[in-house]
Amino acid sequence: MRTAEPAALRSSGGGPDRATFLELFFDLVYVFALTRISARAFEDLVLEGGQTGWTAVTGGGKTLLLLLALWAVWQGTAWTTSRYDPHHLWLQVIVITALISAMVMGVAIPRAFSHSGLMFAAAYVVAQVSRPAILVLVLHRQQYRRLKLRMLITFCATGVLWLAGALLPGSARVVLWTTALLLEYLAARFGWPMPGLGRSTVSRWDIHGEHLAERYQQIFLVALGETILLAGLAFTRSPTSPGMVAAFAVALATSVLLWRIYVQRAGQILGEAVTRAAHPATVGRSAADTHLVMVIGVVATAIGYELVIEHPAGHNELPWLAVILGGPAVFLAGRARFEYEVFGRVSPSRLVGIAALLLPAPLLVRLAPLVAAILAAVVLTAVAVADARRAWGRPPEEAATPF
């Protein structure tokens, strides 16, 4: 543990800087938090859908809002440990604070738009405000402190919206929380501009590229682990039947396929792509958006697992198909962009796979959910086979990022 100033990490220095045990511990909290996201969505799809005709826009939008807030906390922490020494005492305080906040947010997720709203909002604000506040105090170099001061001012301002929204009911809470997240995203996108303090150019940010790439790989694995966990829990809490056994087998096969498609080959060499780029931070920011899309797709797929395992022979509704088929389609869309970030191209199999998942959806309404799940697994298998054929007999492809 170090107590001197947490000097900025440089992507050109030394060798790879692996994630610390504390960072991996932090990721474990997200396994729980993502299960709460899935539980909330599942409750909307099954309970509310069966009673009032679930509205995908409102229910799904609220769940997505909570997921984006969780992602903002994780991403801010990952970027901080990729810019500064993660073994430093104050950096560890930042990670522990984010860990506790994420846990509290996860506990509050199922009722975040009712009686747990203040718990969720307060935990989020603590995580986001404490990080730049601590760095403003411990950093001595002016160029680093100015950035953290702008971030602190931004999060304090949006924190008012988060807390005020938690005290308001229904749609007013959604509006204020959405506005706060949008303002934070725009501030980050444009270098945290602030009158009198200027703004930053993202391409000039110092990051340890391999460390950041490893963190994105790890959060994808966390999301993938959540699919395994949900499939297992859904299968064990219900009486088994041949349809449930088949649905469970399809769910496991789909998880393996998601892993295979991710790692072949871009997922293996993301760190190489980041460090080779002229501006590593630009690739890192793009990879952040890409991994968010893929994580959303994986989480939606996990929700589909629960639906299919518990209702393998029921009748599909459009909201059900939105997660059973839409989840893998969103993942493939993110994976297509990921391939472009690493290699500067997009394989046609990604686009064909998306079309093969979405176009048959109207024909699958009122058929068994298991049929849709099998279709998703078949399409993902075809994409994985296309990837394997392209790489067969050739030397490992090197990164050629267009950034």
Image: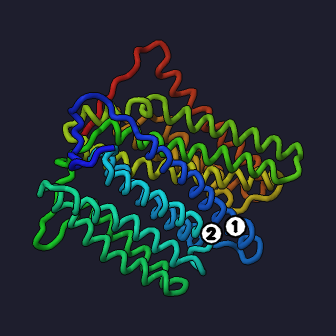
Q: Where in the figure is residue 403, as x and y percent of width and height?
A: 24, 40
Residue at left offset 21%, top offset 45%? 8
Which residue is the site of mark 2?
110
Q: Is 101 located above or below residue 178 in the figure?
A: above
- The local secondary structure at tag 2 comes to helix
Looking at the picture, which amino acid does disc 1 mark?
Glu
How many numbered callouts? 2
Q: Alpha-carbon neighbours of circle 2 within 10 Å: few (<14), some, or many (≥20)?
A: many
Looking at the picture, which amino acid does disc 2 mark?
Pro
Quarter of the image for the N terminus: give it. Answer: top left
- The local secondary structure at tag 1 comes to helix
Q: Is 170 located above or below residue 27 in the figure?
A: below
Q: Quadrant of residue 256?
A: top right
Q: Quadrant of residue 401?
A: top left
Residue at left offset 58%, top offset 51%? 31
Residue mark closest to the camera, 2 vs 1: 2
Left or right, 393 with reference to 282 = right
Q: Where in the figure is residue 23, as x and y percent of width and height?
A: 44, 46
Nearest the eye: 45 or 35? 35
Which residue is the site of mark 1?
43
The way the protein has been coloured in the rendering is rainbow
Q: Is 87 located above or below residue 123 in the figure?
A: above
> What is the C-alpha distance between the residues marked 2 and 1?
9 Å
Q: Is residue 319 visible?
A: no
Residue at left offset 53%, top offset 41%? 221
Left or right, 263 with reference to 154 = right
